[in-house]
Amino acid sequence: MALSARKSVASSGLAASLARRDVLRSMAGLGVLALAGGAGTLLSACTTTQSGGEVLAADPELASLVGSIIGIDMHSHAAGASGRLKPTYDLAERIRAGRMTAVCLSHPGDAPVIRREPDNRIRTVRQPEPGELWRFTQRRLAWFDDLVSGQGFRRALRRGDLDTAHRDKAPTIVQAIEGCQFLEGKLERIDEVYRRGVRHLQMVHFLRSDMGDNQTEPADQGGLTPFGRDAIAECNRVGMVIDVAHATMKLVEAAAKASKTPVILSHTAVAQGRPAEFSRRISPGHAKLVASTGGVVGVWGNPSTMKSASDYVDAIARAVDAAGAEHVGLGTDNSGFGPTPAVWDDYRDFPLIVRLMRKRGLSPDEIRNIAGGNYLRVFKLSVKGP
Ligand SMILES: [Zn+2]
């Protein structure tokens, strides 16, 4: 059934709670509460009464549903993963507090040469020096090592690791890289990053790629290049999740044929009709194409087109209409929107998102699939080991 046809039981109460909490957080960030005297008590009162944990305590049915979900965010740059020298907060604790299991945490491989311009578009500002992006990725891999040891994370490395992590309530990262320009034509680097713990590679990002065309630049490589095809074969060989976010539909069509495993499109939104030129959104047909591989389309929390967590869940419903509930996932792009946070950027709020999905009319099975089960299926088909 098309979700839009059984549209919502209003969820504005919780959405408003989330929005209010965000407002209070940003007030705190601006130092407003320090000026307002006793208001600090108000903030802590609101935070505790409206947190995911409180909602779970008040709603045993929701708590049991959340407990049955292997919650996975398919795309995130949380806690400074993109380029900060040190993790900016205790990400593992937030994942644990929100009853999630894993986050696909990535750094953009082209970060040194792209910049967010005042019009909020990200553009390439120069060409990288030879070796520069490989050195950058090696520094980020060391950052991930420090994150894992410093915060007590596990890494999902083998097929069974996400199930085990859920059983043990152990916060886990699926280590990812967004954009593969660090390869510099050397396929053997896929195996090198694999050995460092990476299990999820997104082929293209903003910088023009020798793997093929991205959505935000003029497409002149006919979709997937021969090098991109070889990289897919190497990902299949070593056991890596293949992510076609940012790629043109033509690239996705070729990748769908080339890959032996389903492909992920980790973070986007499904447009009502045809998306504007150079938009990062995708058409319903593009979403269906990903679904036809057995793959998953992740829905992002883009603050330039969404105002609340309720809007986020509406975007999930649109993606379900296009691709089916077995082919949609959470791909928040947490910390990927510059200074503006994603509409839900704190994993402690995961139970509130689950509750909104339930109010939106999704069944427990559909919610379990969307909130992590679909990604888990592709992960198990892509990586090796027990
Ligand atoms: Zn992205």
Image (cartoon, rainbow, N blue to C red):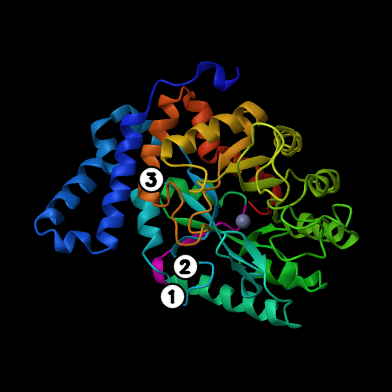
Where residue 378 sits in the image (x, y, percent)?
Answer: 66, 44
Q: CA distance from mark 3 to mark 1?
A: 24 Å
Query: Would you say 229 lies left or right of 64 here?
Result: right
Could you tell me which secondary element the residue under label 3 belongs to? Answer: loop
Q: Is residue 1 above or below residue 107?
A: above
Q: Confirm if mark 2 falls within 8 A of ligand 1.
A: no
- Report the image quarter containing ligand 1: bottom right
Q: Residue furthest front?
A: 119
Q: CA distance from mark 2 to mark 1?
A: 7 Å
Residue at image x 73%, y 43%? Answer: 262
Q: CA distance from mark 2 to mark 3?
A: 21 Å
Query: Would you say 28 lies left or right of 272 here?
Result: left
Residue at image x 24%, y 36%? Answer: 57
* Residue located beneath label 3 in the image: 99
Where residue 272 sits in the image (x, y, percent)?
Answer: 64, 31
* Residue located beneath label 1 in the image: 86
Task: State the residue in front, 37 or 285.
Answer: 37
* Residue located beneath label 2 in the image: 80
Could you tell me which secondary element the residue under label 2 belongs to? Answer: helix
Q: Give the magenta part as a residue range.
A: 150-158
Residue at image x 37%, y 39%? Answer: 351
Tags 2 and 1 in contact by the CB under 8 Å rule? yes
Query: Would you say 36 lies left or right of 226 here?
Result: left
Image quadrant occupied by the N terminus: top right
Name the amino acid, label 3.
Arg
Name the amino acid, label 2.
Gly
- Marker count (numbered): 3
| Mark in front: 3 vs 1 | 1
Q: Is residue 55 above or below residue 158?
A: above
How dense is the environment of label 2, judged by Cα within 10 Å: few (below 14), some, or many (20 and up)?
some
Q: Quadrant of residue 153?
A: bottom left
